[in-house]
Amino acid sequence: MLQNLPWLFLALPLVAAAIDWLCLQRCPRAAACCSIASAAVCFALCVAYLCGMQTGSPGVYEWFPLPGYSLTLGLLMDALSMKMMLVVTGIGLLVHIFSTGYMSGDPSNHSRYFAGLSIFMFSMSCIVLADSLLFTFVGWELVGFSSYILIGHWYDRASAADAAKKAFITNRVGDFGFLIGILLTFGVFGTLSFSDMAGHQAVPAQSGVLTALVLCLFCGAVGKSAQFPLHVWLPDAMEGPTPVSALIHAATMVAAGVYMLVRLQVSMGTDAFSQTACTVICTVGAITALLAALMATQQDDIKRVLAYSTLSQLGYMVMAAGMLSGEAAMFHLYTHAWFKALLFLAAGAIIVRCHHEQDIWRMGGLRRKMPLTTLCFLMGACALVAVPGFSGFFSKEAILTAAWESSIPLFVIGALVAVLTTFYMVRLCLVAFCGSARAEGAEHAREAGPSMLLPLLILGVMALISGYGFIADTLVPFAGFHAHDFEFGVPFLTGLLALIAGGGLAWIMYGGKQKQPDTDPLTPRAFSRALRHRLYIDAFYDKVLVGGIQQWGAAIVHCLDDGVIRRLVGHGAALFTAWCGKILGKIQCGSLRAYVLVSALGLIAAMILFAFTIIH
Amino acid sequence: MLIWLLIVPVLACLLIGLLSAPGRVTALVSASITMILGLYVVVVSMLPDFDTECLTTFCGIPLQFTTATPLCPLMLLLTVVVTFAALLGMHAPGKSAERSWSISTLLISAGATGAFLSDNIISFYAFHELALIPTFVMIGYYGRGERRTIAWRTTIYLGLASMVLLAGLVMLCIEMGTTSISQMHALVTVYGKLPGTPVTMGIISGLLLAGFGTLVSLFPFHSWAAPAYASAPTPIAMLHAGVLKKFGLYGLFTLAWALGPASRFLFEGWNEVLLVLLLGNVLWVGYVTVAQTRLDKMLGNSSVMHMGYLFLAFAAYVTSSGSNYLALQGAGMLMLAHGLSIAMLFLLAGQIEQRTGTLELCALGGLARRAPTLGFLFGLAGMASIGLPLLANFVGEFAIFLSCFVGWVPGASSDCGSGCGFLDSISSLLGGLGSVQLCVVFALWGLVISAVYMLRAIRRIFAGEIAPSCENVARLSCSEVLSASLLGALLLLFGIAPFLII
């Protein structure tokens, strides 16, 4: 009995979601308590396991039993999954608490919101604890679903409903590849279970089918972790409530792609990742990191800046995973989860207090109005731009070091992204927090309430300290992780240089006492316009792929189906039937002579037949 | 005992038709009895050592009924549940209409039950024909739009298909020397009998595929389905799309199971053709579905599209000589799940139309604000039909896709050394994939297509600004909620715990 305790990680949030949705529709407060309780118990359970509690290996769920091959679902509890669970449940719990404050003035249905959060906690736990690709895929689809309902929480807003749809469908495109990869894995390894894949010798390493398999699985990560070219859904997903953006679209779900890649490298062995596959993965990550950082520099919406920054950081992680440096990828995933959740929650607090104003050019002077929130935000920003001493510094250092050792072009891109990161974060901070208020909302802003401040402060502490060896060594989700000692080498100097260069550039553009522009001074430039329009990638998808190929293609297919197939087959059948009727009708002509003639002919035919059979 | 599953609804029909008993109530009583009885039969037939003789005899006379074929319990469960839900959620326009709606619903249900339980191929066929007649009549009298034309077209289409099918079935029975499915199974598995020479096998399988295929709306014989479902009254659409259409697939799978290893030889000649045609179902009809602007047409086409996956399972099953249990059980699961989900969708579509007076997607909007329960139930059914995990359709689809890779060995051509490039790996992969596996890869795109049309429909109907037609809609009544929830609860149950009925 006790050995099945880990199943509570899945059962509790699922039950909480069901109760919220079915029984507590009318009492939102109880629904919030129910969800928070389930998240808190999961967090406590996770801490207990990490402190060394042992309950034996959990039972396996016989999901689809068959004589030949059974599909089973089981839990895999190793260092990778349990420490990842700590990140998920820890940030999840804080976001649940923050949500009570954030949603308090909102007229929408809170029970649905908290049910959505609980479904998310359930499905994310499925991905993290899954012992097989089947279970991963179950969670994979369900996080997509929970993200869909949470982005579309304010579904009567057309933009939110469209963004939710876009997120789900874009993820499905990635899942198309992911599912092919899963099927190929089953074909090649004969199993979907992670623990059985290790040391499988049936297929020679580096063979083509293995490369194709890895790349197909990577497609899933491209969709879920919003890598180029499927990155378009993540900025739009900011239509959802901000705590959701913090939990799902920054800290945990979007990192699932990276987690999955590292899980595969651990279970299949890094040999399975051929040179070709690694090059593709690295390139995709590097392109995403660079493009997203560029786009972030010209966004005006505070959440969009953070969303593009998330994309760019995910690009870093995928790049690291492609360099077979799962350690660096998971380290950055872990620090990023804390500081990006912090940034989003602080942004959420600001948005609420500025009366739902998200445009940074209508903020300003917030450092005097909301000092604690500003402090938290700045700590998150310092971690993100990798100021030495903050958590992000250590993990970005690890990635840059890995890039330095594996390929110079990737290192250069990494350094460039670091410059851009500093640029857009310093820009954001200067515009939003310095100077004086530019609009009514910012004028009347005041400090956030305790239910919002408490999570911010906790996350702020984590953003500061989570990179140091004494805490990282025990908490980074990677088996045998060891924080490297500080090295005074090229990566460090580059990081420092990037910090100074990006910060300096931003100061020149947006800083200074006398400058207080109301719009971005770069707006008239052509490159700014292109970056604001997201390099026209979204427009291309909307106009060409969705509006053009899909819409017109579907219309043409529909026309052909109706005009050709229905007419040809349907009318053909009708004509054939009518023709049969006509022929048979001719026989029944009603003329006595014809009937006599036919009977006579029949009689003769019968006689001949009989005669012949008698003769022979 | 199984015969009661047929006698009860026929008695109820007589009561309603001849003695003018109240239509809906009588039918509901009959449906409740058959549901309880059906559930009992399903449960006992799953017990490992249960003597089925008491089921198949009536007053000591052995009847040619069986529950021993692998998909029979699933289909029986589907039939009784959908019948009950259809009658519970039914809204007939007036008293006399209510009587004829009830009678036809019961007759279709009885016909389908008889077909699924038959051990004799001829009665299997005849029961299905019995169920088709009320379908035609109901479309012709109570349908929407050009109901007469649609009723005639459906009649001609399915009538011809049935004749082709009958020819195939008769030939098969002659070649095997028996009309009993269980005897056929015994003959093949024990004596290794083959159904005729390669040429006759080719003819038989061609006739069976064309006949059964048309009944299941296999591309390109699918044009009857969507207009017929869109036009039919709600309970008829539910029963036909949900239950009766599965007759064709049930027939194919049951015959393939009965013929066991011989099924491979029987269907070998048509396998590649079938793979291409089923891609037509998934991709071609998928895009036809995307182009629809009316909810009922969209649902009808989506139902045609999903049949492609079941033919995929069939292809995987016969190429494995009937040893691929994953394909068989996955198909059974998907047939059940698809029946439940499409019936639920048609039920809810009927309720939307009744409240707003339209099913044009562009005339609807913001309905979830006015009728949240309706929105929740429709979302549940929609998510089930696009294969969300925890709901039954996912189990079936995943098992089917996986079953196509059972027994596949990566091709020898995939070995190209360490220096192989990206294109090499793709070409070697294509060389390494068999035709069934290749077909799966293409068919998987259907998952994206179905997400596109279903989410678009949900977005148009339930989200966004409230449209004028949705301004004053009544909430769902208790019986409406109950009938849809019954279907939804089963989708959820079998999605979480599929082992209950495998």
Image (cartoon, coloured by chain):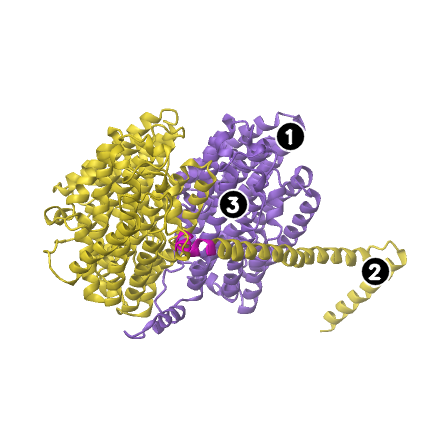
The magenta region covers A528-541
Upstream in sequence: badge 3 or badge 1:
1
In the rendered image, residues at marks 3 and 2 fall on the same chain: no
* Disc 3 element: helix
B463 or B329: which is nearer to us? B463
Cα separation between marks 2 and 1? 54 Å
Cα separation between marks 3 and 1? 31 Å
Which kind of residue does numbered mark 1 sit on? Pro
What residue lies at 25% left-to-right and 35% top-to-bottom?
A: A39
The colour assigned to chain B within the rendered structure = purple
Residue B369 higher or lower than A390, as above or below: above
Q: Which residue is mark 1?
A: B93
* Disc 2 element: helix
The reply to whether the C-beta atoms of the residues labelled 3 and 1 are less than 8 Å apart is no
Host chain of mark 2: A
Residue B206 higher or lower than B464, as above or below: below
Which kind of residue does numbered mark 2 sit on? Ser
What residue lies at 40% left-to-right and 30% top-to-bottom?
A: A109
